[in-house]
Image (cartoon, rainbow, N blue to C red):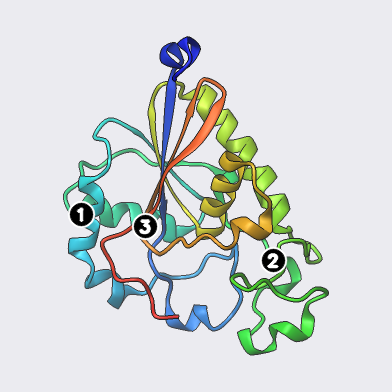
Amino acid sequence: MTSPEALTAKTTRLWLIRHALVDADARRFLYGDQDVAICEVTMAGQGQAYAALGDRLPRTAVWLVSPLSRTVRTALAIFAAGYPEQPLIVEPGLIEQSFGVLHGTEGLRLAERLALPAHDFWPISHAERPEQGESFEDVILRVGAVMERLATEYAGQDVVAVCHGGVIRAAMAHALKIGGDSALRLTVDNISLTRIERRGQAWRVVSANETSLPSPAF
């Protein structure tokens, strides 16, 4: 049974969208929080997916992007597909994980530079903090603090945030109170939608990885 407090508490809804697929050349290397180009060919062929995504979003919402151009391009593609254009607010705390000195490492050579074995579903271990970078556990703390601030600043409102796979996994980790190893086992596809909300002081994941695209075969 729902408590009386929960019935009267304001609910803040976060609509988290992972950015478009990045360019194939960029995907050969570890790019993390570096500003790399999106794949123009893929984006051009996904107009229907952007329209379907826009149809699921609230029409009255605050729109956030990370400081990286791939999130801005993704938001603009949603607008171009029919969603009414909105002002975009840059939220630095929603940037992807920084891999520090590992940035630019070619995928096949990455294992040679790691202090810990890589995660099964992430380039590095959830616990590894590269020089000049962050561990994924650091990202959970960073993103969790942003979520709490946004839920207070925009209490009772809808917030659409176009951000990154690592950020969305970290957001779910914060909401579910799980560690980085478990969070990195959650799938977050490109241009997918994950919905998280805070009712009063309690978080929950409403849905994860909603997508109208086929899952990649890997």
User: Residue 42 or 14: which is nearer the viewer?
Assistant: 14
Reading the image, the residue beneath label 2 is 99
Query: Helix, strand or loop at disc 3?
Result: loop
Reading the image, the residue beneath label 1 is 52
Q: Position of residue 129 (x, y in %)?
A: 78, 62
Q: Nearer the viewer, mark 2 or mark 1?
A: 1
Horizontal side, residue 85 vs residue 26: left or right: left
Quadrant, the N terminus: top left
Query: Mark 2 is on which residue type?
Result: Phe
Q: Could you tell me which residue is drawn at 50 percent across and 57 percent down?
A: 164
Q: Could you tell me which residue is drawn at 51 percent across and 23 percent down?
A: 153
Reading the image, the residue beneath label 3 is 192
Q: Residues within 10 Å of mark 3 (few under 14, many from 20)?
A: many
Q: Position of residue 51 (x, y in %)?
A: 19, 55
Q: CA distance from mark 2 to mark 1?
A: 33 Å
Query: Helix, strand or loop at disc 2?
Result: loop
Query: Mark 3 is on which residue type?
Result: Ser
Q: Could you tell me which residue is drawn at 73 percent across and 59 percent down?
A: 135
Q: Position of residue 9 (x, y in %)?
A: 46, 15
User: Residue 109 or 197: which is nearer the viewer?
Assistant: 197
Confirm or deny contact between disc 3 and disc 2 (CB under 8 A): no
